[in-house]
Amino acid sequence: MSIVFYYAPMSNASRVHASLAELGVKHETVQYDLQKGEHKNPEFLALNPNAKVPTVVIDGTPVFESVAIQLALGERYGVEKGVWPEAGTPERLKATTWLVWGQVSLMGTMFKYISNTADYVPAALHSAPQAEQAMKDIHDLLGILEGHLAKNAYLAGERFTLADLDLVGCMQWAIYMCKLDMAVYPKTAAWVANVSARPSMKTEG
Ligand SMILES: N[C@@H](CCC(=O)N[C@@H](CS)C(=O)NCC(=O)O)C(=O)O
């Protein structure tokens, strides 16, 4: 069993780094400086033609897209470690649902807001109406998350899973970038604080 983890610090790869720490999985690491374009080398492009981190090679097979990597790590190592529900259970379906919801629906909408407001995007590409609509959509989605966490301690029910780790990793960045007042969402704020306190979340690859 071998894992090679391609990453850059302070990037989408950080959530996968936290999962590897949570699981205690032995792995090799390859660090790239994205600013210097180190990831655009032919060997890495052969593994991931998108030239993006995170990328993980599991027993010789490249896996890219952080959600696909989290699912692969969860299935392979997480069940045994008690941080990914067993196949065929309602909890597995819930963990998968919320993992994908977090990345596709919530983060997709947050990214829409950020790309219409952030300093790193040229101002000519900003659209105030798009940003306003995205912020309304973010509040609708956070209301859904708040409602879920009012009835469940974690995304998949009563137990922590890698879905919580993944979405909280995103939320930490999004709360800052979208300047969200989390006092309006007390259950979500408490869940973010709880999951952020895990030792695996303190590691930075
Ligand atoms: N949807 C991808 C996004 C990956 C991504 O955008 N990674 C960025 C770092 S945060 C990257 O590698 N950028 C390098 C580049 O675009 O050249 C995932 O979730 O894995």
Image (cartoon, helix red, strand yellow):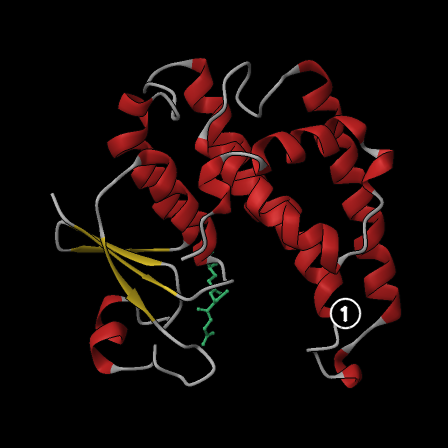
Q: Residue at x 88, y 65 (%)?
A: 129
Q: Is residue 148 above or below residue 129?
A: above
The percent position of residue 105, horizontal first and vertical second, equals 63, 45
Amino acid type at image mark 1:
Asn
Q: Quadrant of the N terminus?
A: top left
Q: Nearer the viewer, residue 194 or 53?
A: 194
Quadrant location of the C terminus? bottom left
- Answer with left or right where residue 42 lies relative to residue 93: left
Front residue of 116 and 188:
188
- Residue at image coords 40%, 49%: 16
Q: Residue at x 35, y 47 (%)?
A: 69
In front: 62, or 15?
Answer: 15
- In the picture provided, is 128 more to the left or to the right than 119? right
Q: Is residue 140 left or right of residue 158?
A: right
Residue 13 is drawn in which quadrant? bottom left
Horizontal and vertical percent for residue 102? 59, 41
Asked which quadrant contains residue 181, the reply is top right
- Residue to which mark 1 is pinned: 116
Density class for disc 1 (Cα within 10 Å; few <14, some 14-19, many ≥20) is many
Residue sitting at 34 percent across and 16 percent down? 88
**Secondary structure beneath disc 1?**
loop
Q: Position of residue 184 (x, y in %)?
A: 87, 35
